Amino acid sequence: MRSVMKNILFGVCCLFLSCSEGFLDAKPDKALVVPATLQDYRALLDDSEQQISQTPGLTELSTDDLYCIDGFWDTGNLTRGNAYVWKADIYAGEDAFMGGDWTKMYAQVLRMNVVLEGLNDIERNDRNGALYDELKGESLFFRAWHFFALLQSFSLPYDPATANQDLGIILKLSADINEKTNRADVETSYQRVLADLTAAVELLPQQTAYVSRPNLAAAYALLARVYLSRFDYENAGKFANLALEQQDDLMDFNMLDLNGRFPDPFTDDNPEMMLYSMPILFSSAFFREGYVADELYADYRESDLRKPMFFSEDGEGHARIKATYYASDVFPMTGLTTPELYLIKAECLVREGQTDAGLNVLDDLLRTRWDTEADYSPTTASDDEEALRIVLTERRKELVFKGLRWYDLRRLNKDPRFAKTLTRTYNGETYTLAPDSKRYAFPIPNTEWMANPGIQQNER
Amino acid sequence: MMKPIVLLLALCLSLGAAAQQDIEGKILSSDSREPLRGVNIHAIGTDAVWQSDNNGAFSLRNIKPDSRLEFTYVGYRTLQLTAGALIDNPIVLLYVEESQLEEVQISTGYQRISKERTTGSYITVDNKLLNRTVNTDIISKLDGVVPGMLFNRNSNFKINIRGQSTLFSNMEPLIVLDNFPFERDILDINPNDIESVTVLKDAAAASIWGARAANGVIVLTSKKGRRNQPLQIDFRSNISIVEKPDIYYQPRMSSADFIDIEEMLFERGVYASAENSILKTPYTPVVQLLIAKRDGTMDAASVDAQLARLKQADIRDDLSRYVYRKEIKQQYALNLSGGSNINHFYVSLGYDQNRDELVRNGMKRFSLMAKNTLSLWKDRLEVYTGLELSNRIAANPNSGAVGLGMGGQSRLYPYASLMDESGNYARTVRNYALPFIDAAYEQGLLDWSYRPLEGVYLNDQSTKYAQYRVNTGVQAKILPGLDAGLLFQYINGASDYRRYRSVDTWYARDMINNLTTVNEDGSLTRPIPLGGILDNSYGRSASYNFRGQLNFARDVAEGQHLTAMLGYEVRDNRYTSNSSRMYGYNDNLAIGTNVDFVNRFPRYVYPASTAAIANNQEVSELIDRYRSVYGNVSYTLRGRYVLYGSARLDQSNLFGVRTNQKGVPLWSAGAAYTLSSEDFYGIDWLPYLKLRASYGYNGNANKSVTAYTTVRYDDGRFTRSRLPYARITNPPNPELRWEKVKVVNLGVDFALRKNMISGTVEYYRKKGLDLIGETPYAPSSGVQEFTRNYAHTKGQGIDVQLHSQNTRGRFVWTSDAVFSWVQDEVTHYLADLSSASSYVNAAHQNPVVGRPQFSIYSFDYVGLDGQTGNPVGYLNGEPSEDYLAILSGSSLDDLVFHGSARPTFFGGLRNTFQWNRFSLSANVVFRAGYYFRRSTVNFATVWRGTEQHGDYALRWQQPGDERHTVVPSMPETANPARDLFYANTGAFVERGDHIRLQDVNLTYSLPERLAQVAHVKALDVYLFMENLGVLWKATDLGLDPDHAYADYVPPRSIALGINVKF
């Protein structure tokens, strides 16, 4: 009875309270917030699990790094198998393939635009300046990150001659979901990526507390990656250097348990990690059960500790993935790491004629991968082209399952020396992907042009 | 019948002698025949006043037989008669006020108004009609008896009153119990406590309920006692037996066909990846047999023998035997009511026990209601107190046939058995291949075998609900005609969910095994300790309601009556919940074990992959607040002209909107004219005729959409970084507006002479403005679908309710008919969809201007190709088999429009026959003017070896088949575009029109003489049969149009009941 009385009393209080303005301001759900403070935006940018930084998933199914046995794709969603064999229409009427790359990455673009617009309403002052800049820098960084990934998935490879006409991506720059935009050209899209990153460089801190938050080094590293993809080796090299000035640590593979995993990016310290990211997983089984390309596996030499660390043999001469920087499974870790910068730096130096300097950089990296029991002999090359070939081979070997193979195929195909025709045999049929194939740009999902009919679809 | 005789006698005798004499008599209640104590008897024109004694007896001394006497008694109609009439007939019967036919009161939840003075659309379902059916909940009793009210059986218990006014917002009508909105489970109400139900349909009726009234309002009025009513005890009990569900209802692929497909796929190597999978992907027992046959580990003959045996098996046999059963529902209700001079009370007890059709599932409910109303200070002050308790336990460990599949989602292969020959629970394949499970067991892991019946018989899953409701109110007469009332209600609800899965259940063993590591010395490390897993979830809700209201009702001048009301209302609803999980739980000791939620552990099946132990700690707190001001005025002139107006402003703590959007003003106006009361009215055969009209706005609150960006916080315990994070739940929508529904209602109430036929005909028009709905968006905007204002709609309809008295006398035959026609169309649609596929796909509402909101479209269809059995459609007007191009290239104009997906005509006819003490009534209902799309085989899933639709057997197989089947041939390879195309052609669209015998009630009432012998006042025994089947349907298929997608139709049921009054 006492509690009933108490409740009645409470009710009476409510009645009077209700006359005051505060009554209707109570939040209907405690976990809901209209983001208004820097802490809210901090939380929006901390959604690290498969959210803010995730990279395309279809590209991971389409590279020449991994293959699967016949029948592997017969019991699931067809889009995955179609991407695996580079079919023209990969969605094949699976209209409701809702979780596509396009959809998920634009969802993150919206998130970044929400943060950027929200920050405009907050006054930056001396007390909040550091956090304010960090958040603005991160959201610009991630917008560029997703625009770049979208370009690599849904537009043809960069070609300086046609970049002004080639179809780029939708440059969504506002949080207004009703705004309709068509695709910009490739050059304009690239310029937006570079502009966002250049702005982010001014804002990002040198150190961040978590590998899910980009720091200054990550912004430089992404700039290096972007410039490399547009064959601007001068800038690529420059930003690789700037990034390495911030962070150049390498992990000595001799210190690793070769039967185990890599250090967890969050709970252990992986000194090479600049930014953590993972791909959209269309098929976790593909990475767990797929076989590493035999030609790639054969390229690893005996004293190369990456061989036992990355792969496990199935006893019949084929290899599967054993460990990646993802650490808690064998999925690709598609973020940014220092080895990528060593390799960009080496490639740029070699391409600019500084072959020895370039190979020295490569050696710095490879020494940490070499069994200390065996002697490491420095890399030598008979000519510049061989040096470049060595750097590019080492690049593929080092950066395997770091989300870069598709990007590299696209750009290297522009150079007849390194162009490669991909071939795949699946269920008795042989499929090829020519270096100049239009299928290097994935089709835009049906759901987009259903609601945005003006949009131009990619020719395949 | 007594009254006219008494009056007649009085009239005759008053002409006789006029000498004073003593007259004695007795006063009884007309319905219960109980003596009435303390009735005031007044001789008009004198000071003489008498009162009846305890036995209702009175004795009038020295009175002239021609004196006029007036009998007054609270709760009863005042009676006047001439004293002399009592000499021949000393029994005076007083009639209960509420039983006066002319004075039907309608409860709106805010006030009781006389039906004469209403201008809006109300339908009242009285107690007799409520008692006709046997149900556990009160709302189901309204099915088929209220015009304009449609129970959508194809979706989840959704009620539409006069069509759907909203698309995404709350679609349910508002339910009001006595005075306040009832927002909890309808099962918390004991249906036997409800006296009557009023359904408010138009703006004038419903707008007083404000922002939640757009879907209509259902007002439940609970039973109560009467002043000066002798104690009355009412006992009811019934038992219903429902037939076991027919789970063979939907056409399913035979095991033979399924195994043939598996053999074919095996030949093509489809299972090779599962067989070689390092993740131990499961494959079926048939695939395992085929592997054994191929590898020679079993001889071919015995494999073939086993396959032949499996081809005869049907999992539905075991499901029907071990998982389903007859549903049995028992109900007991006892109530006591009565009243004295200064109070009246009602006390009831209810007990329900339902045994569900799923083995081990069921519900028990205990309910109590106690109410008392006290009149003080010569009736100037009324104090009301009420208490309700409801305790309910729902056990649902058995989830039926759902989730038994190998991956946990799809159906289980059709030849599985649930029980083996020796009577043990049989294992089926789940998550991992059987050889792997057996090898793991060898290593010392727990038996990983999945046995579906373990889940049914060993799980322990139940929810306890407890709630109490406290009501108090005071009503004071301040001035003549002016009352002031204060009402308060507090509701406390608690739910306690518990799911305990012991280590004997697959779920617990799977969790434990999943993270078990085998060490080098062969010992095991188990991060999840051996033991059960206990999940708990507690919810608590508290709701405070306050209402202050002024009521005014009086004749303001000769022939002019004014009623008015002004009120202020506040509601505060809180809901908190928290959930938890314990591992290694020992149910005998009630202790669990600590586990490590922080670190990740390698998975046994694939140690390169790690997982953390799921930590199911969760807390949520929700608050809903409302503040409203409302009022209405009704003016009646000379009892026949009525004008009505109402207005209301609602505000709530809507989140993420500007302050001025937190409220919405709504209003209505109405007029009524009782033509038959006019002096010039001379239509003898139509003695009662009333015309009504109303106009106004209803609103609909949608708390899930916001104008500003809203984000939801998460503690991040499932992420790798474990950082708290936020996700966008609503992108910004600055254009958000409130949904409003404009309603015009025109009605005619009439009665033929002697009430031969009486009824109501209403015509209404509705305009939905700025309706909020979920529409697909271009993903580049950042969202794939978005909830926003997107359409205007208009609708119109006719509701008819008729009652006819076909015969009178010994054999009484009455008919009640309800009929509704409803039509709606979209008038403006703000989204621009281009692809035809999105219209045929029912995942979204894809309104088209000029068409109903819920429509069935299909691809234009040539038919099956006579040579290949391929479905042929049209592309640019030419026959085509380019399915992708048809899917992507068709526009809306290329589609065939069939019609509404919701019934546009519906209603029912209930005939009641009474003969002697028997009463028989049957309700026949119909639905018409709508279409549905039936499901069919999907060949892409045939190619995956998981399809189980029975249409596979009907597929085109050779030229000529196209003449008797609509199911295409099996394609050479999986082709989802082809599947999508033919499944959405007109070949699979069916008319939904049908007539069904909903229910039959047969009641026998014990004759009064026998009742007296049995020491009861009345005794009824009844038989009630429900879901008696479809009498006629337009489609030739075996499907019931109302249950086209269900696994089974609601089975027939029969109930036996008794109702005793003491």
Image: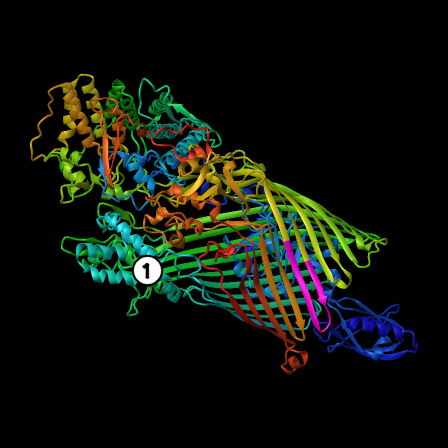
Residue B653, relative to residue B339: is it above or below?
above
Q: Residue at x 45, y 29 (%)?
A: A117
For the record, the magenta segment spans B802-819
The quarter of the displayed image where residue B302 is located: bottom left
Q: Residue at x 17, y 58 (%)?
A: B297
Label 1, on which residue?
Answer: B415
Main secondary structure type of the part rendered in magenta: strand
Residue B664 percent coordinates (x, y): 61, 41
Is B475 in front, or is A307?
A307
In the drawing, does residue B673 fall left or right of residue A186? right
Residue B20, relative to residue B506: is it above or below?
below
Q: Quadrant of the N terminus of chain B?
A: bottom right
The quarter of the displayed image where residue B830 is located: top right
Q: Quadrant of the C terminus of chain B?
A: bottom right
Mark 1 is surrounded, within 10 Å at the Cα level, by few (under 14), some (14 to 19) or many (20 or more) other residues, namely many
Q: How is the image coloured?
A: rainbow
Is B984 in front, or is A263?
B984
Toward the bottom, the furthest residue is B1013
**Count of numbered circles on the image:** 1
Note whether residue B275 is visible.
Answer: yes
**Magenta highlight on residue B805:** yes
Residue B950 percent coordinates (x, y): 40, 55
Q: Residue at x 43, y 41 (%)?
A: B872
- Of the residues shown, which amino acid type is indicated by label 1? Tyr
In the drawing, does residue A226 fall left or right of residue B169? left
**Magenta highlight on residue B877:** no
The quarter of the displayed image where residue A344 is located: top left
Residue B786 percent coordinates (x, y): 48, 38
